[in-house]
Image (tube, grey):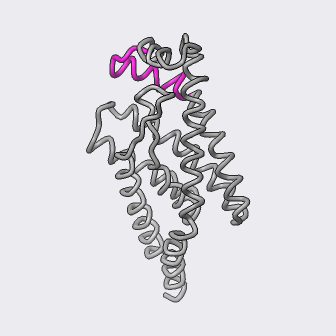
Amino acid sequence: MKRSKLNFMTKAAMLSVIGFLLMFIAIPIPIFPSFLTIDISDLPALIGSFALGPVAGIVIELVKNILHGIFVGGTAFVGEFANFVVGSLLVWTAGIIYKRKKTKTNAIVGLLVGTLVMSVGASFLNYFIVLPLYEAVLHFPVSAIVAMGTKINPHITNLNSFVIFSILPFNILKGIVASGITMAVYKSVAPFIQKEAAAAKVAEEKA
């Protein structure tokens, strides 16, 4: 049991650090406000969720955001909180579906459903919690955020339209990018993670 837990913690920690480092590679998308940037920091959590289980995916999301809040900061953990919740919706949903039947088809279904759940969840989260927190904690008015969206898309006139035309499509795009890369690399990296976990389990059973 101890060896299995240690193996889990080691793999999760390794993937968390990779996720944290990937948060520094953020690409702005011209059709969205500048603070909405695409990164692939959910990739290690998705790999962990598929290889070690959905709980691992959430642990990886949590640790990477704690590291980011401590070493980078700048948002009083509001941004990290949002990143954690939104990322967890994706990796938990995808991981649960894949765990039921570990096939390529189920992986694709899990990633697509996870992207949908994440995008809808992110919309509600930003509307009711995150954007109001930015205003209350960081004194960054919601009206200023909406104005940033209006400069890019004239259809954005209030918080509702900002969420519909910016937050929702942005997270759909982010989920598609993360899902595509996950499908491309998972087959290559999963055997290493699963082999180590299986070896720890066998050693435990023999002990």
| Residue situated in front as seen by the camera: 75 or 39 | 39
Residue 104: image x %, image y %? Answer: 69, 63
**Residue 147 in the figure: left or right of residue 73:** right
Task: From the image, give the main secondary structure of the stretch colored magenta.
Answer: helix
Q: Quadrant of residue 132?
A: top left
Residue 64: image x %, image y %? Answer: 39, 50
| Picture layout, residue 81 above or below residue 201 | above
Q: Quadrant of residue 6?
A: bottom left
- Residue range corresponding to the magenta coloring: 125-142
**Residue 13 in the figure: left or right of residue 73:** right
Instruction: Name the residue rendered at 40%, 22% in the picture.
Output: 134
Q: Is residue 90 magenta?
A: no
| Residue situated in front as seen by the camera: 52 or 188 | 188
Question: Furthest residue to the bottom?
Answer: 206
| Picture layout, residue 205 above or below residue 190 | below
Instruction: Name the residue rendered at 32%, 31% in the picture.
Output: 76
Q: Quadrant of residue 118?
A: top right
**Residue 39 in the figure: left or right of residue 169:** left
Question: Furthest residue to the front?
Answer: 30
| Picture layout, residue 170 above or below residue 151 | below
Residue 175: image x %, image y %? Answer: 58, 44
Residue 133: image x %, image y %? Answer: 42, 22
Instruction: Name the residue rendered at 50%, 54% in the picture.
Output: 43
Q: Is residue 138 magenta?
A: yes
Circle count: 0
